[in-house]
Image (cartoon, grey):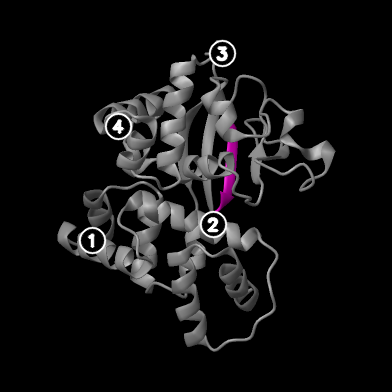
Amino acid sequence: MTNNQGVARLSYLDAPSHAVPTSSRSGDSELGYSLWEELTEGRYVVQGATHSATHCELAVVRCPIERRPSSGVRRQFDYLRRMLIGETQKVVASAAERSVSTVAAASRHSLSLLGLDCGLLYVPYLLVRAAHVASGVALRPSEVARTDPGLACHVRVERPDLFLRAVLSEVEREVAGLVLEGYANDTIARRRKVSVRTIANQISSIFRKLEVSGRNELLCALVRLEQAHFTPAHSLTMSDENVRQRQIRMVRMGSAETLSAHVAHTR
């Protein structure tokens, strides 16, 4: 990862204090330690999301004037965080003693404050990931290309859909990858030169195999896969069929220990 002058200046974000050398931590750059905090505290906004064959990337830029959030805005960001980690609007609304419509409107407003013009279905993976880290989930530190002040910082992680080989068919993995990238069904259909109905059927099959009910739950399942990849793995020998069945269970249950066993076997 390089800046506009072509000079790579790599640091780390969302890293436990012991995970990277002190001299390399992103606290020494413009960005702090937590992507979620940097965004929700009004210091940075999202400029855009991009994807390569191996990585998901989010470009963030410093706000010209820091927008210190009020207590009401902080509460709205908390609604958004809880929905991004998999809680339904109904559950969040009930816990907050608010109406579902109020919580839905608050989440849309929160996304706009972050620089995003999208609904919950199309939130970038790195934001979903940041919400999980802010909720206490331990993940591999994301890489940050530090740029000169005033230019974008690029935060990236390895694509989590690369870990779905044992669960989905090749076609389903490709479609799941496009869902991860935030494409709508009609755009995926055009890219793959098939009908929208075919894509809808393939996405339904993906959801059924992973036992998730929507795009956000799919991203949450991918966070669990990434979590297991970061967790110290156990040594395990299994047949290919046992690996496939075991990974299906671990995606459904979100079991870090079971996921780790699969990662150890497939490395």
Q: Secondary structure at mark 1?
A: helix
Q: Are marks 2 and 1 in contact (CB under 8 Å)?
A: no
Q: CA distance from mark 3 to mark 2?
A: 33 Å
Numbered circle sitting on residue 199:
1
Instruction: Identify the residue position indicated by label 3 in the image.
Output: 66
The residue at 27%/60% (across/down) is: 192
Between marks 2 and 1, how big is the CA–CA gap? 23 Å
Q: Are marks 1 and 4 in contact (CB under 8 Å)?
A: no
Left or right: residue 218 versus residue 198 is: right
Give the residue pinned by disc 2: 54
Residue matched to label 4: 104
Determine crowd level at label 1: few under 14, some 14-19, many 20+ residues with C-alpha closer than 10 A: many
- Vertical order, 3 against 183 (above or below): above
Res. 65 mark: none
Residue 249 within the segment the image draws in magenta: no
Q: Could you tell me how far apart the alpha carbons at marks 1 and 4 are, in whole angstroms?
A: 27 Å
Tag 4: residue type? Ala
Q: Position of residue 128 (x, y in %)?
A: 47, 43
Q: Residue at x 65, y 40 (%)?
A: 14
First in sequence: mark 4 vs mark 3? 3
Cα separation, mark 2 vs mark 4, equals 33 Å
Q: Is residue 237 shown left or right of residue 99?
A: right
